């Protein structure tokens, strides 16, 4: 299992190698989908009780770094 980012891990045997929170089967995309659908951080924590507030912060930082890359247009 690789520690790709604080609290974010990638393990080929967990969720098909997609980024997850602390090796659990809670994908980064699951947390982002809940937030994007309008749930507050507190509601996400209630929905996914194994998560901690720091996990949500790590998911947002991870997503932000993945989107912050140059795009070359030809």
Image (cartoon, helix red, strand yellow):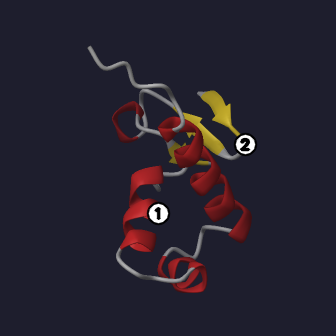
Task: Locate the N terminus and report the quarter of the image it occupies.
Answer: top right
Query: Residue 41: x percent and y percent?
Result: 58, 78
On residue 31, which mark appears? 1
Would you say residue 5 is visible in this rendering?
Answer: yes
The kind of secondary structure element at disc 1 is helix
Q: Relative to residue 72, is residue 46 drawn left or right?
A: right
Q: Quadrant of residue 36?
A: bottom left
On residue 59, which mark appears? none
Query: Residue 63: x percent and y percent?
Result: 52, 47
Q: Quadrant of residue 35?
A: bottom left
Would you say residue 27 is visible in this rendering?
Answer: no
Task: Locate the C terminus and report the quarter of the image it occupies.
Answer: top left
Q: Nearer the viewer, residue 5 or 26?
A: 5
Residue beneath disc 2 = 6
**Cα separation between marks 1 and 2:** 15 Å
Q: Are marks 1 and 2 in contact (CB under 8 Å)?
A: no
Q: Earlier in the sequence, mark 1 or mark 2?
A: 2
């Amino acid at each position: 299992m690789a520690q790709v980012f604080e609290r974010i891990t990638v393990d080929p045997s967990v969720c098909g190698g997609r980024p997850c929170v602390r090796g659990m089967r809670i994908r980064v995309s699951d947390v982002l989908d809940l937030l994007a659908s309008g749930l507050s951080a507190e509601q996400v924590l209630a929905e996914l009780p194994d998560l901690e507030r720091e996990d949500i912060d790590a998911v947002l930082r991870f997503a932000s770094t993945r989107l912050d890359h140059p795009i070359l247009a030809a």
